[in-house]
Amino acid sequence: MLNYKDILYVSDLDGTLLNNNGVLSENSISTLKKFVNLGFSFSIATGKSYETTKAILESLKIKIPVITYDGVCIYDENRDMVVCNFLDEKILSDILKKTYIDATSFLVYSLTDGKEKIFWNKNKKNNYVNYYLKSRNNDPRLEEVEDVNKFFQGNILFISFLDNYKNIVNLKEKLEKIGISNSWINKDSYKKDMYWLKIKSLKATKGNAIKELLKILNKKWTISIGNGSNDIDMLESSDVAICVANATAGLKKYSDYEIMQNDKDGVAEFLKNQIDFFINQNFLKNDLTIHNLINYLYFGEKIADINKK
């Protein structure tokens, strides 16, 4: 018998749960509060830090661990770090020696003395870094460093480069030539021509983090929802993979189903259907697989063979 208390629901934030202005709609807030209050397990997997998602978590009353920095860290409901995958020193040394000179941007995310820091240098501040810094003008994590060697303070969470797509792809190829394969490209959700290249631990993925959450929460199944390339491994690791209508073409290849776009509260509307099925209807007779459930529940298809989108 499929019980909703055995399911972990996980959503990305930017471009998925949040609208195009980067905020939660009133409809999403009220739906998610109801969803959580009814006993459903809902978490987020985001590229953001815990600090920048804290207000969202508090507004939704989420009481289970969340995934931050695209799978680098997991924080529990008490704001304690449960899991964190740091970069090793050899990779840091290679990056500094072989890519720093030619790079037009360089941001280092660190855990130093128990606090998250973002180190930057004025000589590695292209237009995209300028945009990033201005958009986070009051972020206490930001710290300018004058000495290049001071970039790597504390435990390094990941390194980011910001640039246009062509330059980011060229940089990724250069990294691969020197043996650094643990880099990921992701399009920014708000600035159309800006792309991220993140170097992080090979273990630090949303997919691996979801597997950890399943163990921590003792859940059987995962339904995940995303919109971008940094969500691919999360969808691959889930029992049901869902994308919003505004997702990239690349991500849609990995999804089982497509829901409404983020600006139309696609995630909230999907969760309303989950509530309607599990809470408002009597789910007692059918022993369904997770995929058959979604077919029946959201897309109105009969409980039969899976007919993916």
Image (spheres, grey):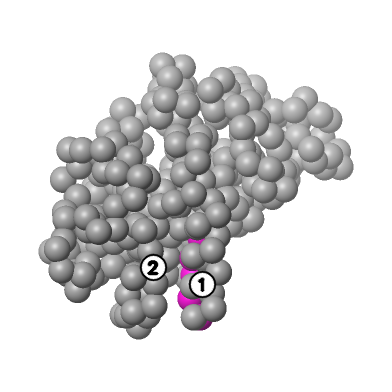
Disc 2, SS: loop
Badge 1 local density, few (<14 within 10 Å), some, or many (20+)?
Answer: some
Residue 63 drawn at (x, y percent): 34, 40
Asked whether 234 or 182 is in front, the reply is 182
Secondary structure of the residue carrying numbered label 1: helix
- Visible residue check, residue 173: yes
Near-viewer residue (211 or 38): 211
Tags 2 and 1 in contact by the CB under 8 Å rule? Answer: yes
| Quadrant in which the C terminus appears | top right
Residue at x 19% of width, y 50% of height: 142
What label does residue 194 carry, if any? none
The disc placed on residue 102 is 2
Q: Which residue is mark 1?
A: 174
Q: Quadrant of residue 308?
A: top right
Residue 246 coordinates in the image, percent (x, y): 61, 32
Q: CA distance from mark 2 to mark 1?
A: 11 Å
Seen in the picture, residue 213 relative to 298 is either above or below; the reply is below
| Amino acid at dot 2 | Asp
Q: Bounds of the magenta span? A: 179-184
What residue type is disc 1 on? Lys
Rendering coords of residue 134 (x, y %) = 26, 38
Quick check: 125 left or right of 140? right
Lower position in the chain sequence, tag 2 or tag 1: 2
For this view, does 24 lie left or right of residue 306? left
Q: Residue at x 34, y 70 (%)?
A: 100
Residue 300 x %, y %? 77, 25
